[in-house]
Amino acid sequence: MSDTQAQDPREPSGSFPEQEQPDQPGLTDDMAPTPDHGENSWVGRGRLEGRKALITGGDSGIGRAVAIAYAREGADVAIVYLPEEEKDAQETERFVTEAGRKCVLLPADLTEEQACIDVVSQAREQLGGLDILIPNAAYQRQREGVDTLQASEIEKTFHTNLVSTMLLAREAVPHMSPGASIIVTSSIQASQPSSGLLDYAMTKAALVAFAQALAEELGPKGIRVNAVAPGPIWTPLIPATGFPADKVKEFGQDTPLGRAGQPSELAGAYVYLASDEASYTSGAVVPVTGGKPF
């Protein structure tokens, strides 16, 4: 019997203080409590030594947790973020460089096609190649009903979450070699959609189909494509979505584990899927949902 006790997955439990951020993107400093990105816990084992990764939405939340884990596993990273997220991006850069790896900062609005073209080109040039693509940036807002939907908001959600993913893959794939990996961020919303997140849920369901179809296309080239489907994870997106205050306070308590997850608890899935340990895994969706069935 081991002397080391396994972590109780129900911990840490508890509710969040009522809070709201008026606009997206949400910012880490304005959250209470501050999310755990693995700053003090992730221990690398060299599983991604020498690889080059491009992570969109890499300034905060899941993207920051992945950037930290990748750097400590030996990868150089480029992160894409909106210009107003510069402070969060610089904090991510600090953790990456403290791990002894290179971090390229690429502020851009990925709803523009040229921005998608440019960030892939700049990441390849400044990193010296590209082995891993993680289209992770996302936009969501609480909707009050289908009759209130505005075309501009639908377009923003689809361009941020779905169109940019396809464009980034289009630009990256011609420069990727056998062993490369694309990992998209889907959501529990793809399987259990909420009416208040109608357009967001649609994009996350579409990303499952995208990952599965692209895995079939790129398998013969030796490029793997997979998806991670997070459940309720405590990121700046949550207080900036426009949820009612009580929903934020009780966020994640409807999962079988009874709590929201932290960004650090997603990092392992992204590390595994990019590593040689997942050499026969492609077209898969890895749910990290606190027990909610996907």
Image (spheres, helix red, strand yellow):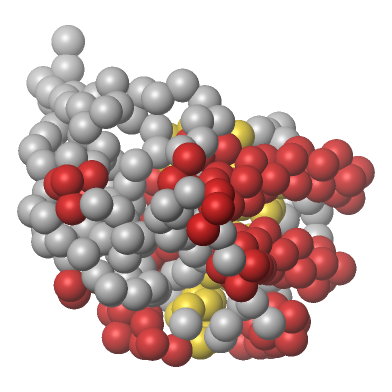
- The quarter of the image holding the N terminus is top left
Is residue 294 in view from this perspective?
A: yes
Farthest top residue? Answer: 1
Is residue 45 in view from this perspective?
A: no
Q: How far from the left and from the top, in percent, is residue 23?
A: 34, 75
Q: How far from the left and from the top, in percent, is residue 173?
A: 81, 64
What residue is drawn where x is 18% and y is 40%? 250
Quadrant for residue 87, please give it.
bottom left
Quadrant for residue 255, please give it.
top left
Of 150 and 165, the residue lying toward us? 150
Taking 287 as reference, is 55 above or below it?
Answer: below
- Does residue 129 appear left or right of residue 20 in this picture? right
Quadrant for residue 174, please give it.
bottom right
What residue is drawn where x is 68% and y is 82%? 112
What residue is drawn where x is 45% and y is 69%? 58
Image mark count: 0
Q: How far from the left and from the top, in percent, is residue 254?
A: 27, 28
Farthest front residue? Answer: 147
Taking 119 as reference, is 3 above or below it?
Answer: above
Of 189 and 177, the residue lying toward us? 189
What residue is drawn where x is 79% and y is 72%? 171
- Does residue 232 appear left or right of residue 180 in this picture? left
Taking 83 as reference, is 137 above or below it?
Answer: above
Q: How far from the left and from the top, in percent, is residue 101?
A: 43, 75
- Does residue 150 appear left or right of residue 44 in this picture? right
- Does residue 294 appear left or right of residue 231 in this picture? right
